[in-house]
Structure formats: structure tokens, C-alpha cells
Amino acid sequence: MPGTPAYVPVEDERQIPERIGQLHAQTVVLDVEPLIATWNSGQQSLDEGVARLMTQIGELPEVRVVCFATNSARRPSRMPDAPGKQVLYLASARKPLHTEPFLRLPRPGVVVGDQVATDGLLARRLRYAFVHFRPPLREMPVGPLLFRGGGELLRPLLFR
Ligand SMILES: [Mg+2]
């Protein structure tokens, strides 16, 4: 069907900024675990991860809004400045059910995340592209690993 948003699997996180640029995204929704900081990491790695991703995405001229969104309750202790860009951070984001925070953000948009059942489904509901970050399985704790297995069953239903 025409206009179906893209599904872009990525295994190396260093490719993510380039993929976002290729999609001409104006809004980027970033899942937090494990792209920004791994599941069991502390405050310092979350702060460093947020700053690292903002530096990378800050170089993409078409991006206007960067929204970190995690279903966990953790928050960074400070938000980095990004000249010319709006930066949002949603903790307890209730992905994929809660779409309201995204509805007025500029399009096209992209969700970057590791779980089809939350990040991918949120992308589908918003008609955003989905950059599916697929880190090596050995790096995943058992909870997210099982959840990922379930999400894989869902993927062909959501994305061609
Ligand atoms: Mg995740």
C-alpha cells in the first residue's frame, strides 16, 4: 500500500544517525534502553547516553524535535542543549498506547527502538518509520529477550 512507513533494521548503533537522515525525519522518538543506556545501568550512563545521542542527532539539519521515550521511570539529571532543536524526555511513556504527546510534532517522524511490541507498534500507530535497533542477543537480559521474541511474531503484521 502506498505511503506505508519504512521498516529499517539496524544492528550497529553507529548507523542510526545516517538512517534517520535518509528518512528525512523531522521528529525523532528515541527509545532509551538499550540504545541510550543499558537496562541495569546507573544515572551516569543515562546522562552520558542522552548527551551522546544528542550530539549525533544534533548534526542532522532536518531534525526539529528529539523525544526520548521510555516506559521505565528513569530520567536524566539534566537535558543537553541542542541549538535549533526541541528536546523532550518522556518517562513512563506507556508506549505504544499513549500517542497524544506525539500528535502535534512535525512529520515525517521516526521511532528508533529495540522492541517491535512497544516501539514498533507506536511507530505504526503514528505512521512513523521504525528504525529497529537489534543489538546482539547476548547483550540482552532475559526479560527484554523474551519480549523481543514475542515482538518478532508481530513484526510481519505491522511492517512488510
Ligand atoms: Mg527498549
Image (cartoon, rainbow, N blue to C red):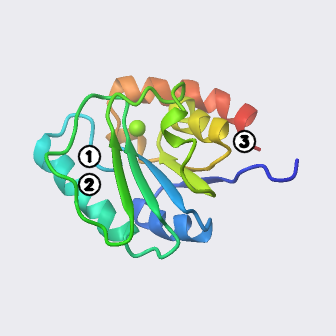
Provide the secondary structure element on which disc 2 rests: helix
In this figure, which residue is indicated by the disc labeled 1? Answer: 37
Residue neighbourhood size for the residue with mark 1, other residues' Cα within 10 Å, grouped as few (<14), some (14–19), many (≥20): some
Q: Are the residues flagged by discs 2 and 3 in contact, CB closer than 8 Å?
A: no
Where is residue 88? Give x, y as percent: 35, 49
Indicate the quadrant where residue 49 lies: bottom left
- Which residue shows up at 52% across the image and 31% down it? 118
Chain-order first, disc 1 or disc 2:
1
Task: Name the residue at the right extreme.
Answer: 1
In this figure, which residue is indicated by the disc labeled 3? Answer: 159
Q: Are the residues flagged by discs 1 and 2 in contact, CB closer than 8 Å?
A: no
Dividing the image into four quarters, tell me where ligand 1 lies.
top left
Cα separation, mark 2 vs mark 3, equals 28 Å
Cα separation, mark 1 vs mark 3, equals 27 Å
**Could you tell whether 54 is left or right of 127 in the image?**
left
Chain-order first, disc 1 or disc 3:
1
Q: Is residue 20 in view?
A: yes
Q: Is residue 13 above or below residue 143?
A: below
Work out whether residue 149 or residue 73 is closer to the camera in this orientation and state it. 73
**Could you tell whether 66 is left or right of 79 in the image?**
right
Residue neighbourhood size for the residue with mark 2, other residues' Cα within 10 Å, grouped as few (<14), some (14–19), many (≥20): many
Disc 3 beta carbon < 8 A from ligand 1?
A: no
Chain-order first, disc 2 or disc 3:
2
Where is residue 136? Give x, y as percent: 41, 47
- Amino acid under disc 1: Ala
Task: Name the residue at the front extreme.
Answer: 104
- Looking at the rendered image, the disc whose residue lies closer to the viewer, 1 or 2, is 2
Provide the secondary structure element on which disc 1 rests: loop
- Amino acid under disc 2: Val
In this figure, which residue is indicated by the disc labeled 2? Answer: 50
Where is residue 100? Give x, y as percent: 53, 33
